[in-house]
Image: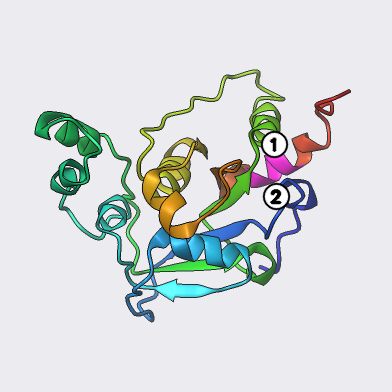
Amino acid sequence: MGKIIIPNIASLMDGGEPVCVTFDKRADAEPSDLLYCEMIQKARHGECYSIAAQSCPVGAYVLGVSDDAPHDYYLRSGRYINMQAAQRASGSLPKIVKPYRSIRIKPLSGNEEKFDVLILYVTPERAMRIVQAHSYTSGVRTVIDTLGAASVCGDCTALALEMGLGLSFGCKGSRKHSEYGDNEMPLGIRFDIVGKIEEELSRIPGTRD
């Protein structure tokens, strides 16, 4: 396929580059001791991964590897007041339903195949510009659907696959373990609308115009 050139989108990140995530039917990968969000952050700075699984129990559920909803983990961690709230939260998590056998994670510059989701880390103003570009031709509002949990795996990957665009304020786990900036928002864009957003970013007015 060759490299996808999207300078308008890529320029929205102050550090590193967008990350391509591909859910692959090839079974040529091993499990990783890293968390999914850690690998996304490392890929932002040039690392490449091909994994059969990752080490976060919440991520395992969201990425469709495990059927064990993480309500016990959520309750033990103090995220919710009681088991009822923890079960409601874990039951609302988005989940990958696409069949696959490995996950390939690469920086945009190192990817030469069709991917499923593009993940960025952007400031709120630049997230705003992506939303504006997304609605440029339709005028349709973008729905922000988040729980403050499972942000990179759930909001920016599983939900982006389902809805096209997944915006997140991050979550405790991903901010703690992958250490992206407090001024950054993770954001996921499904492959089929990446080109549209790239084109429309050049058409919308600048923030300070």
84 left or right of 184 in image: left
Q: Where is residue 182 in the image (x, y as percent from the top left)?
A: 56, 43
In front of the other: 156 or 134: 156
Q: Mark 1: few, some, or many residues within 10 Å (few <14, many ≥20)?
A: some
Q: Residue at x 21, y 36 (%)?
A: 91
Query: Would you say residue 40 sits in the magenta stretch?
Result: no
Nearest to N terminus: mark 2 or mark 1: 2
139 left or right of 144 in image: right
Magenta residue span: 194-198
Give the residue number, with chain letter if any, for mark 1: 126
Q: Mark 2: few, some, or many residues within 10 Å (few <14, many ≥20)?
A: some
The amino acid marked with disc number 1 is Arg
Residue positioned most to the right:
209
Rendered image: mark on residue 13: 2
The local secondary structure at tag 2 comes to loop
Q: Where is residue 31 in the image (x, y as percent from the top left)?
A: 32, 75
Magenta span: predominant SS is: helix
Q: Which quadrant does the C terminus fall into?
A: top right
| Residues at marks 2 and 1, CA–CA distance in whole angstroms | 8 Å
Q: Where is residue 104 in the image (x, y as percent from the top left)?
A: 48, 68
Q: Is residue 180 above or below residue 146?
A: below
| CB contact under 8 Å: marks 2 and 1 | yes
Q: Where is residue 172 in the image (x, y as percent from the top left)?
A: 38, 45
